[in-house]
Image (cartoon, rainbow, N blue to C red):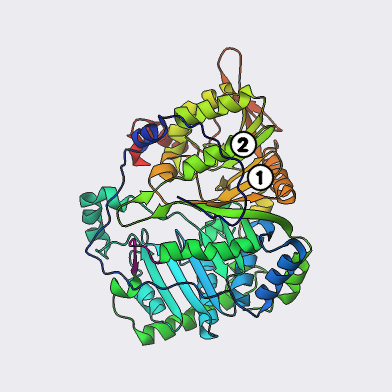
């Protein structure tokens, strides 16, 4: 576990229930994985020095001049449109380096648009390093090989499958479940060593409001300045770890003709597709937008927290970091998290805070807004205990009013899901990252985030959280004196958990009887 030492951290909390790790291992059914030794490893390489010129360097220098070398300027990315737009802005503005770390990168509308912009950055001389988890790359080996073969582009895969077709992967999964169950859930983009975006969004249409099935409400933070400099070290840690292999060492040989035809097709589809609405389809000069953003940036100090990886294991420390962060609260703790299975330690932590008269409010998914019904099945038994421990509990509505900033017209999803992982302590300290509060995030996947000391940013995040807990966006879950749950929004009160359809209820029951390690 790495806590970047560039700034003063909030005071540590020394108390930690001894049962934490044991309980979470029971919940997930997984132990520490061993690393495969039959995949060749690339040679180590490291981040470029921060760019000396370019619009991002200029903005970082302005932050340094205004607030000091340890500070960053932060901007909350709430709407789907803004989250996609600012990723494109960083890619288009890079002049020397571009590093992207992501769990999933879908070959869909947004995934292809971002890929094209990354390739165009490489063509103008930007050094590009890409890290993608190998979980869902079946059938994409030719595309991966062609990307890896591009000038100025390096592509590495996390915890790769040796078997490259679906049938063989199934056999490999059965034989090596313990290792292959570990996935890299981190999300990070760094441009020129001066600007970074991190949070909960993968690269794909569900995360940028472009899906017609459903779209996620999520949060990222854009940081310019010191935090982005620190992110280079975190990226290098993964880039040079034994868990990564070069795409060229695993996949088929690159095909230059297919690569050229694929790029041409990619550009044609990105130019004519109606789904992007007003999203910029071609690279732009973002100098004016960055100058406008500068006056709205929230100053503060921050540091990265993340699970380290070594040849022998993943050093999972993020849950302890999260609990320590929560327990700093003296007056108020707001949590928005997509997947919550607190366990006994989580309930005990909430009770301790409640005993200190801390105002605790928590927002998570309802069954109706859920994309992973198995998680809801194992969250459901904890509802009453969360409330009894002193927290106010809210669950997102599938028809939440915030759909207007989640969907990007002309796309309209059939429902809204929650994917955010964020918290605010005492209107001053903020966490934004990839960490769910469930066993998979705690002891199986790698996770990351940032802890930021900024009253102004904290107020922004708090306002978003309180908006999302309103009755037009969420159900307020309450427990009566006779131990009965009810769900209330601004229109009605119901006494059974809201769902979108009968099938959801059936699946919820089925997953209750399955072993917890299945999710």
Q: Position of residue 102 (x, y in %)?
A: 47, 61
Residue 61 seen in the figure: yes
144 in relation to 449, above or below: below
Tell me how many marks there are: 2
Q: Name the residue carrying label 2.
A: 328
Q: Is residue 163 magenta?
A: no
Label 2 secondary element: loop
Q: Is residue 241 magenta?
A: yes
Residue 397 seen in the figure: no
Q: Position of residue 157 (x, y in %)?
A: 37, 65
Give the CA distance from mark 2 to mark 1: 9 Å
Label 1 secondary element: strand
Q: Nearer the viewer, residue 451 or 479?
A: 451
Quadrant (top left, top right, bottom left, bottom right) of the C terminus: top left
Main secondary structure along the magenta-highlighted residues: loop
Residue at image position (41%, 30%) is 18
Q: Position of residue 398 (x, y in %)?
A: 59, 42
Contact between labelled residues 1 and 2, with CB atoms less than 8 Å apart: yes
Q: Name the residue carrying label 1.
A: 429
* Residue 175 shown left or right of residue 293 in the figure: left
Circle 2 packing at 10 Å, graded few (<14), some (14-19), many (20+), is some
Q: Position of residue 29 (x, y in %)?
A: 32, 38
Which mark sits nearer the N-terminus, 2 or 1?
Answer: 2
* Residue 156 shown left or right of residue 492 in the figure: left
152 in relation to 454, above or below: below
Circle 1 packing at 10 Å, graded few (<14), some (14-19), many (20+), is many
In this view, which residue lies farthest toward the top?
482
Q: Quadrant of residue 257?
A: bottom left
Q: Quadrant of residue 275?
A: bottom right
Region in magenta: 240-245
Q: Nearer the viewer, residue 95 or 201?
A: 95
**Residue 232, label in figure:** none
């Amino acid at each position: 576990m790495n806590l970047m030492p560039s700034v003063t951290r909030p005071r540590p909390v020394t108390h930690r229930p001894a049962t934490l790790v044991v309980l979470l291992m029971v919940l997930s059914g997984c132990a520490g994985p061993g690393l495969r030794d039959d995949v060749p490893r690339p040679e180590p390489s490291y981040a470029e020095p921060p760019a000396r010129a370019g619009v991002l360097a200029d903005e970082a220098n302005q932050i340094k001049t205004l607030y000091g070398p340890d500070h960053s300027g932060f901007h909350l990315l709430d709407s789907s449109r803004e989250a996609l737009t600012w990723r494109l802005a960083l890619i288009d503005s890079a002049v020397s380096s571009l590093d992207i770390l992501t769990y999933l990168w879908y070959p869909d509308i947004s995934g292809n648009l971002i890929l094209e912009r990354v390739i165009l950055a490489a063509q103008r001389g930007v050094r590009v390093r890409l890290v993608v988890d190998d979980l869902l790359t079946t059938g994409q080996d030719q595309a991966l090989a062609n990307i890896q073969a591009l000038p100025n582009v390096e592509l590495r895969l996390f915890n790769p499958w040796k078997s490259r077709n679906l049938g063989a992967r199934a056999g490999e999964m059965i034989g090596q479940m313990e290792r292959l169950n570990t996935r890299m859930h981190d999300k990070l983009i760094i441009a020129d060593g001066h600007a970074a975006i991190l949070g909960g969004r993968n690269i794909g249409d569900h995360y940028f409001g472009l899906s017609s099935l459903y779209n996620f409400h999520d949060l990222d933070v854009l940081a310019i300045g010191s935090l982005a400099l620190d992110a280079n070290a975190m990226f290098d840690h993964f880039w040079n770890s034994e868990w990564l292999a070069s795409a060229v060492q695993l996949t088929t040989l690159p095909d230059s003709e297919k690569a050229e035809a694929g790029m041409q097709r990619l550009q044609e589809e990105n130019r004519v597709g109606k789904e992007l609405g007003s999203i910029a389809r071609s690279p732009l000069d973002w100098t004016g937008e960055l100058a406008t953003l500068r006056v709205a940036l929230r100053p503060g100090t921050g540091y990265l927290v993340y699970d380290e990886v070594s040849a022998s294991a993943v050093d999972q420390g993020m849950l302890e970091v999260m609990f320590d962060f929560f327990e700093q609260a003296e007056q108020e703790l707001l949590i928005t998290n997509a997947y919550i299975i607190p366990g006994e330690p989580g309930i005990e932590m909430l009770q301790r805070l409640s005993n200190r008269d801390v105002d605790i409010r928590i927002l998570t998914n309802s069954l109706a807004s859920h994309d992973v019904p198995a998680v809801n099945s194992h969250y459901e038994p904890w509802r009453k205990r969360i409330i009894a421990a002193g927290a106010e509990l809210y669950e997102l509505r599938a028809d939440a009013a915030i759909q207007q900033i989640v969907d990007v017209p002309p796309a309209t999803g059939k429902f809204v899901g929650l994917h955010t992982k964020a918290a605010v302590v005492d209107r001053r300290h903020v966490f934004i990252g990839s960490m769910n509060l469930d066993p998979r995030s705690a002891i199986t996947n790698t996770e990351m985030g940032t802890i930021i000391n900024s009253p102004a940013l904290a107020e922004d995040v708090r306002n978003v959280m309180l908006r999302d807990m309103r009755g037009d966006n969420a159900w307020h879950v309450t427990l009566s004196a006779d131990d009965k749950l009810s769900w209330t929004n601004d229109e009605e009160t119901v006494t059974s958990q809201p769902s979108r359809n009968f099938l959801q209820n059936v699946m919820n029951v089925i997953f209750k009887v399955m072993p917890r390690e299945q999710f």
